[in-house]
Image (tube, rainbow, N blue to C red):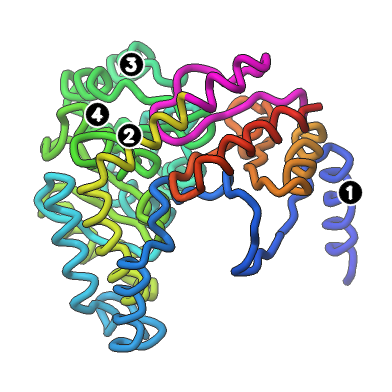
Amino acid sequence: MADWLDGLRRRAALRAKAGLTRELRPRSPGDARTDLAGNDYLGLARHPQVVAAAADALHRYGLGATGSRLVRGSTDAHAEVETALADWLGTDRTLVFSSGYLANLGAIRALVRPRTLLVSDAHNHASLIDGCRISGAQTEVVAHADPAAVESVLAGHPGRPAVVVTESVFSVDGDLAPLAALHSVARRHGALLLVDDAHALGVTGPAGAGAVAGAGLAGEPDVLVTATLSKALGGAGGVLAGPEPLIRHVIDTGRTFIFDTALPPAVAAGVHAALCLARDGDQLRAELADRVASAVDRLTGAGFDVGGPPAGGVVSIGAPGPETAVAWARDCHDRGVAVGCFRPPATPDHRARLRITVNVGVPRADFDRALDVIVECAP
């Protein structure tokens, strides 16, 4: 009966040998490490107005939503943040999920009809990949950020309903998808464009409305947007934005919406407060861009490969291999700097990286010192 456990232990040993073991590292409220690993780009997670809004809702509603959105979990806090998101993103309507992962699964499933073809970027996030797989639709994976590759696939399947699936700012390397070109290709073939704007929302675009708005595509009827509320907005949850009939369809049929307990009202209220700050946060975005440029200059000057110019707050640093990346991140951690460590299978090209995510809530002197630590700890 224990054979299956022995099998898991053997697989764990193989992962350890390849440098692919992952660890949970609980942090205390007083953790003094400089945070270049989390996604709180605008430093809003601890902003007094955000915390106060969440605390007020916590006292008014209690800890959890107590049910799914359609049973008992929808509150005024959910409705208010959905209205604010729709106005910010320039869409008919939005729908909030308990996570960005579930929003992506639900969005893709909602767009799939019989014979639908999904055209997915090779560097897409795991939630988009899983959404394509779970949908059961034929999926063609195309070269990264390559509109010509998308065109070739769509041209090879004339007359079929199709959805082009991409991130905007990619989560591993921080580069920007050619959204305007992808939309042009999709529209030419009658396809929809689904964009996960998670790492761009709050960070790029007019008033921080994201890369879709920045590309002039906000509100286009053939463009659907998903995002997480856990990055620049410092909270949790996910959102689907698009035409009203799509949102109506998901409310009626979307399993990841219907059968999931709703986002806690306190989180929805905190996210709403963060959204208001982000919308008026041009100075925060300017500081973020300045720090990203500073990080690129410091790291490239030290001889590191950081790829192309980052489009948001993600700066990726190539590492020789998984074990080296783990040791590098651990040494940074021991010297008071938290950085991301990305290894296969989390990387689309099977290369290991350190990933730093710039947070303007970190004091500038601490940020500059953290860059020095990363350089000094390099293998």
Question: Of the residues under marks 2 and 4, which one precedes in the sequence?
Answer: 4
Q: Position of residue 268 (x, y in %)?
A: 30, 69
Q: Looking at the image, is 214 positioned above or below residue 111?
A: above
Q: Where is residue 341 in the image (x, y as percent from the top left)?
A: 67, 40
Q: Sort mark 1 into few (<14), some (14-19) or many (20+) by Cα contacts within 10 Å.
A: some
What label does residue 147 carry, if any?
Answer: 3
Q: Where is residue 199 in the image (x, y as percent from the top left)?
A: 40, 41
Spatial CA distance of label 1 from label 4 is 46 Å
Q: Which amino acid does label 4 sit on?
A: Arg
What residue do we see at 50% from left, 48% from top?
362
Q: Nearer the viewer, residue 74 or 175?
A: 175
Q: What residue type is labelled 1?
A: Ala
Q: What residue type is labelled 3?
A: Pro
What residue do we see at 84% from left, 37% from top?
18
Is label 2 in contact with label 4 (beta carbons under 8 Å)? no
Q: What residue type is labelled 2?
A: Ala
Looking at the rendering, the stretch of residues picked out in magenta corresponds to 294-321
Question: Of the residues under marks 1 and 4, which one precedes in the sequence?
Answer: 1
Q: Nearer the viewer, residue 102 or 305?
A: 305
Q: In which quarter of the image is residue 344?
A: top right
What label does residue 160 carry, if any?
Answer: 4
Image quarter in which the N terminus is found: bottom right
Q: Mark 2 points at which residue?
A: 286
Q: Name the residue under label 1.
A: 13
Is label 3 in contact with label 4 (beta carbons under 8 Å)? no
